[in-house]
């Protein structure tokens, strides 16, 4: 990296990325110019910091690039917009291998391609660890933006995309159960672990479900990045409603149960908990899958990738805005209620 | 900061910022929605990293906010666009005082106001030092974007804004000559130093000079962030031309000469250099003033804030793209040529 230098890196990044006719001015000028045919632009910015959001020995450079792009582009989709562009600020140590930067760029480009967007600009700097700040841009194509504040009593609450898979994958990596890139390879990594670890390393947000939900009349929508309960809590608070979830609709799948059994989350302080309750915790609080959650008016025919998990009720309740099977959820204090 | 938490910080930031009717969806949803009446959006992203781009003991929180905003917004103006919005990603240590975050927000808002823009969104994270990543957005209002690649032989080269002031101010701070916030206050800080130190702490880029230049027919434009010679080198390279500067037009002012005398840049390895040559070095290589440099067709009547400093010639030369008074400038190897 030090040998390449800032200008060399920018030139290289630019050369490694595919051209996009919608990018009117791309990398290499003072700023990018991007088509915004709707007359409005949707924009969201996110950090992805080494040590905090990823480890270079647990995620490859392309995986880090995919994740960095995914975080911002799914935010754009969660407004009901089509992602169009991505700006990438990259700070890195001088001894970062150029091959790592190239892999990162490939991951950024690949995830942009999944979302229908392109890398349009960026910045580079020197730092003691890898710092990424991505900004996603998008076009509403005439749609009203879907806010967090529009959920209405009687609406259905549904999700598109997996819940808890990335959190389980991270737990497997942390426990040394699954293969890591730089660390020791466990003797016999279980096959069911692979998709979970992949969900952590390469989340695959359902970008087109965002505009789809908007077109179906979604009244509120959010990207699940902080965990299902926390993010539905944002919708409930912004909308002034209560959201009641059905635990039966959130039952963890076999791979999550197997992961919980392996990781033994309950080894120390949670000795009395079951595998089911630990797996359910990933479903309710794992955020890194970047699924979408939305409220829809009752009676809407939802495509199969949307799973109804609850409904909107008048509220909020007395000190809570999320309930499960009609029982208040009041944050960590009330957490054990759902752990069987 | 730790007490406030991420959501508390976002809510607080939002409450500290003035509302803007052009911001259709602001802080607090998955993404911002901003008017882009031109049908195109201009976007640029930049890091401002503690220890690398600023020191908390040399710059106040509002100053850091102003500088962070300035870096991205002037990039937008350098395309000929009007800045409209700013996204701010802030990572900080848990023990960062909330008052510092508030001061930062005030600085961001103040600089956005100078540029005619608003803070529309952001992200927060934990880090061991203060990391800022800003994304400026802007609207071309029907103008063609002014690229780096359009300069043509015969064009005049002009700058709007100061050159070398911020670099001189930083040198004064580094030498302990000017007042610093957290360090020792020198016994008798010289009055001429104050505007130079202020230029480092609070650069005041001439945002409206960007669209003005575009309207005057500028053929190429750039924000001077890497230094005059380096940035004009980018224009020359992108345009396939040679740029010849007039040293008489770049003569350092009295305050730069006084600063050079005080700092005695030449104390050790540069013993033979004059104050004039050291001050000229700030003019030619200091980038943090964020002045604008542009090429204009010959005969254009320029407003007084634009100072003609050279002209575009056919080129490039043999191994160089910038000359001064007709003599090749070939980078650091040829640097002493201009140091008297």
Image: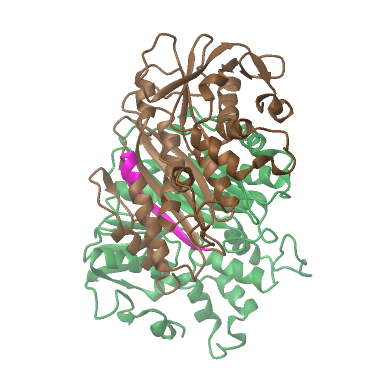
Chain colours: A brown, B green
Query: Which residue sits furthest front?
Result: A188
Location of residue B314 by image quarter? bottom left
Q: Magenta part mainly helix, strand or loop?
A: strand
The residue at 39%/84% (across/down) is B334
User: Is residue B122 on the magenta stretch?
Assistant: no
Q: Is residue B294 left or right of residue A339?
A: left
Whole-percent x, y for residue A275 in the image = 61, 34
Give the magenta range: A112-126
Which of the pair B228/A332 is nearer the observer?
A: A332
Q: Is residue B304 above or below residue A150?
A: below
Whole-percent x, y for residue B304 in the image = 40, 55
Give the quarter of the figure containing the C terminus of chain A.
top right
Residue B263 visible in rendering: yes
Whole-percent x, y for residue A84 in the image = 33, 39
Q: Is residue B12 left or right of residue B334?
A: right
Location of residue A215 by image quarter? top left
Residue B80 visible in rendering: no
């Amino acid at each position: 990296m030090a040998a390449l230098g800032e200008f060399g890196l920018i030139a290289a990044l630019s050369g490694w990325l595919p051209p996009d006719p919608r990018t009117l001015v791309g990398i290499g000028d003072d700023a990018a110019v991007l088509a915004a045919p709707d007359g409005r632009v949707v924009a969201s910015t996110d950090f992805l910091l080494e040590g905090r959001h990823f480890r270079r020995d647990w995620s490859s450079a392309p995986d880090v690039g995919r994740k960095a792009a995914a975080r911002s582009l799914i935010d754009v989709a969660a407004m009901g917009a089509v992602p169009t562009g991505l700006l990438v600020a990259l700070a890195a140590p001088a001894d970062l291998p150029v091959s790592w930067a190239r892999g990162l760029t490939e991951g950024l480009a690949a995830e942009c391609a999944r979302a229908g967007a392109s890398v349009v600009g960026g910045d580079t700097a020197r730092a003691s660890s890898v710092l990424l700040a991505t900004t996603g841009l998008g076009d509403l194509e005439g749609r009203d933006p879907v806010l967090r504040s529009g959920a209405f009593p009687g609406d259905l609450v549904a999700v598109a995309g997996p819940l808890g898979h990335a959190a389980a994958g991270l737990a497997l990596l942390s426990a040394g159960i699954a293969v890591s890139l730089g660390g020791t390879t466990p003797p016999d990594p279980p096959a069911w672990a692979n998709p979970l670890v992949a969900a952590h390393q390469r989340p695959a947000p359902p970008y087109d479900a965002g505009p789809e939900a908007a077109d179906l009349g979604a009244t509120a929508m959010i990207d699940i990045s902080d965990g299902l309960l926390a993010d539905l809590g944002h919708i409930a608070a912004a909308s002034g409603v209560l959201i009641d979830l059905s635990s039966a609709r959130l039952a963890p799948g076999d791979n999550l149960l197997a992961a919980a059994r392996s990781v033994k989350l309950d080894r120390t302080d949670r000795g009395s908990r079951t595998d089911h309750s630990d797996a359910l915790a990933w479903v309710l609080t794992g955020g890194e899958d970047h699924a979408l959650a939305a409220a829809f008016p009752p009676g809407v025919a939802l495509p199969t990738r949307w799973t109804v998990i609850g409904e909107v009720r008048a509220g909020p309740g007395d000190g809570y805005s999320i309930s499960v099977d009609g029982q208040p959820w009041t944050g960590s204090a009330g957490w054990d209620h759902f752990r069987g």
